[in-house]
Amino acid sequence: MTEADAELLAAIHAAPERDEPRLVYADALLDRDDALGNLIQLQVAQAKLRPRTAEFTRLQHQIDAVW
């Protein structure tokens, strides 16, 4: 883990209700071709939706594929 990763994770832990630190961390992971970044982006997007909607289900299928 890099120092930048540690700082981003600290920001996530400091404000767990905010999506921005998670999305910045996801971007950093994607810059390194780490699929965890994609998973984080999908989960953040899905968390904004109501369950059992078509979009929620579509995102769940993408999340399942990443896992």
Image (cartoon, helix red, strand yellow):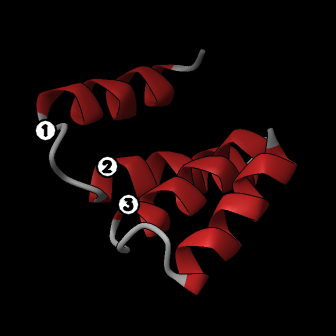
On residue 21, the disc is 2
Judge left or right: residue 19 versus residue 31: left
Visible residue check, residue 54: yes
Judge left or right: residue 36 versus residue 54: right
Indicate the amino acid at tag 2: Pro
First in sequence: mark 1 vs mark 3: 1
The answer to which of 40 and 12 lies nearer the viewer is: 40
Can you identify the residue that label 3 sits on? 47
Q: How crowded is mark 3: few (under 14 residues within 10 Å), some or many (20 or more)?
A: few
Q: Is mark 2 on a helix, strand or loop?
A: helix
Q: In which quarter of the image is residue 15?
A: top left
First in sequence: mark 2 vs mark 1: 1
Image coordinates for residue 3, horizontal then vertical, percent: 46, 20
Visible residue check, residue 33: no
Image coordinates for residue 16, horizontal then vertical, percent: 19, 37
Residue under the image location 78 percent in, 48 percent down? 64
Image coordinates for residue 1, horizontal then vertical, percent: 60, 15
Indicate the amino acid at tag 1: Ala
On residue 28, the disc is none
Judge left or right: residue 38 versus residue 35: left
Can you identify the residue that label 1 sits on? 15
First in sequence: mark 2 vs mark 3: 2
